[in-house]
Image: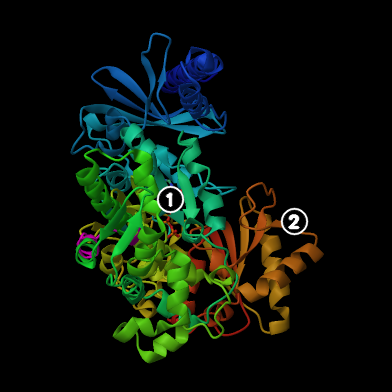
Amino acid sequence: MPAPDLHDDRLDTELAEERRHLSESRAALRRMRGRAEALFATGDRVAGDSYTAEQLGRHMARRVKELADDPDTPLFFGRLDIEDTAYHVGRRHVTDDAGEPMVLDWRAPLSRSFYRASVRDPQGVATRRRFGFVKGELTSFEDEHLDRGEELGTSSRILTAEIERPRVGPMRDIVATIQPEQDELVRAELADSICVQGAPGTGKTAVGLHRAAFLLYLHRERLRRSGVLIVGPNTAFLSYISAVLPTLGEVEVQQSTLDELIARAPVRAADPAPAALVKHDVRMAEVLRRALWSRLAEPTEPIMVSDGSYRWRIDTGPLLRIVDEARREGLPYSVGRERVRARVVGLLQRQSEYRTGNSPSESWLRRMSKAAPVTGFLESCWPAVTPESLVAGVLTDPSIAGDVLTAEEQDMIRWTTPPRTVKSARWTAADLVLLDEAAGLLDRESSFGHVVVDEAQDLSPMQARAIARRSEHGSITLLGDLAQGTAPWATTDWRDILEHLGKPDASVVPLTVGFRVPEAVVALANRLLPALGVDVPEAVSLRRDGELAVVPVAEPADLDARTLAEVGAALAHEGSVAVIAADAAVERLRDHLTAAGIEHATPDDLEATARVMVVPATVVKGLEYDHVIVHEPADIVAAEPRGLNRLYVVLTRAVTRLAVVHARPLPGPLNIA
Ligand SMILES: Nc1ncnc2c1ncn2[C@@H]1O[C@H](COP(=O)(O)OP(=O)(O)OP(=O)(O)O)[C@@H](O)[C@H]1O
């Protein structure tokens, strides 16, 4: 019989101890949750009034939710040994009944060393331990004895396994394996606005979401009041990322597309491309500003108003001064209008005080502010305007733009048949951006404490201004890749967008290490880069595994069948499968899958169990799949002006295998050997 391996024995004992710590931590978390639930149940009885009861109730409900334990997610994933004390690092704090920490939240100051300590700068850490899990079961660990000069970096087995694991379902958090360059961004100060330029799969989305969670932890009360907003490119993307923050215990972050954020009216019409381009141009802000303020007029008549006992009069001279002063104060239009009204009433009040010796009552002041001569004066000199009436005015007669737009541009946005009333206007998506700008000229927009914008390279200047209004008193994290810009107005220089966002001094930080796309696939996609007209660093993939197949099909009629055969081949492996095709081919391909009896889903269906999806090229941004089958790249390129950028996005969605099936010649830049 072979002698027992003492080394293995020691490891087994340690593993058993760690497992015990895990189950004790789970039990402690259950008790924490139990206590929170008990408090929740009695909350309304201890609260003094219904408002406090509601506030307390909401707080407790959130706390109970935050303390939910997901049996499939490890409660801790690392351990730091510092001066003979072991600290387990996990998704949230867990304390024992005496309040002693059993697991430290990954965002706690001490946990920082888990991500940053190195042999060169050990930060007091003797050993860093990473745990391997299979479905919530602790199965292994890996130690780095920093005090003995051992450091694994990206060769960590556990990191590699995490990166290479097959993808199924929505995006997961990366707390266990955040890399030092990512951690620096995640833990940046709340006051700092940053712009992350990163090649596909470098973890930009992950960094943005983890930064939001980190800021909420550190500035809980402040950000709870002002709010944190995540802006993503489309609903499929938002569904994909929606689970990340809740798994990190953050359940109160607003996640929205830009269109949803500014949707003050339904979209019922579409613009021709040239008109949309003009409407998204930053000069439209100036056009709207001019159109609005040109509505002011000089007072030409005095105000004469009676309160039933006396008659009062304000001459045009003082009225002119009031309007001029309010104009110079630079207030939003509607705020200025109310200020003018208040000053007019103030003058009436002074006259009344002078004549009667008494201060008039509140109701007298209210009556005067609504009196017909006062509102009549306002209507002629500072008329009420709504966003809809302002934009409708400009689209009915764009000549108000003067020399800001050329005559040709004015013609492009002019309504051919103006609606009978503003209410019946059929707004386009670009009009909503204008309506939002108009609303911002009329009133103050409330600002979030922090805004994360993903795929930000696609923001138009006017869209960036919509976000600027919502982050005026907060900071932003801008995430994107200039090479993935597909919108007609996509930026080629981050400084331009940052300027429109009102954060010109934000630093632009590159991320270059790719965690998604295998090296061979990155190499293919990188062939497109020189043709994209942007200056960005190439991605370097951490993944040496993965497969790439370019599949020529001789007969165009066989293209779909060959694509289906690739789906069949992919299904023999573990993980998700996506056919990505030009939008026009999507329905047809879905029908083929149905006819072949292959279960399939759409990308925004979170509940779907099917492993296969057919995804239109225009919605695949930000998403990833284990096996990607790209159907006819030439059609994807031909479908839109920035088709090559779209193809670059499409080719960089694969985690394990990419098959490019084509009957037409491959787009030129892909052919460079
Ligand atoms: N430190 C990490 N550890 C493990 N996985 C990571 C890490 N960083 C990123 N990933 C994984 O790599 C994949 C790509 O990340 P993410 O989607 O955030 O990249 P991205 O830069 O936003 O990509 P894209 O430009 O295509 O939108 C995701 O599956 C993410 O979980």
List x then y, in percent, for residue 248.
45, 36
Foreground disc of the pair 2, 1:
1
Question: Taking 583 as reference, is 1 above or below it?
Answer: above
Question: Taking 446 as reference, is 379 above or below it?
Answer: below
- Kind of element beneath mark 1: strand
- Kind of element beneath mark 2: loop
CA separation, marks 2 and 1? 32 Å
Question: Taking 637 as reference, is 620 above or below it?
Answer: above
Quadrant of the rendering where the C terminus is positioned: bottom left
Observer-nearest of 581 and 381: 381
Q: Name the residue furthest front.
A: 309
What amino acid type is highlighted by mark number 1?
A: Ile
What amino acid type is highlighted by mark number 2?
A: Glu
Quadrant of the rendering where the N terminus is positioned: top right
Observer-nearest of 177 and 617: 617
Dominant secondary-structure state across the stretch colored magenta: helix
Observer-nearest of 627 and 548: 627
Give the numbered dot on residue 490.
none
Query: Is 491 one of the magenta-colored residues?
Result: no
List x then y, in percent, for residue 328.
20, 63
Observer-nearest of 177 and 142: 177
List x then y, in percent, for residue 459.
40, 66
Give the numbered dot on residue 599.
2
Residue pictured at 62% horizontal, 73% vertical: 583
Residue pictured at 44% horizontal, 64% vertical: 386
Left or right: 531 with respect to 357?
right
Instruction: Give the residues in magenta.
Output: 323-334
Disc 2: residue Cβ within 8 A of ligand 1's nearest atom: no
Give the numbered dot on residue 230.
1
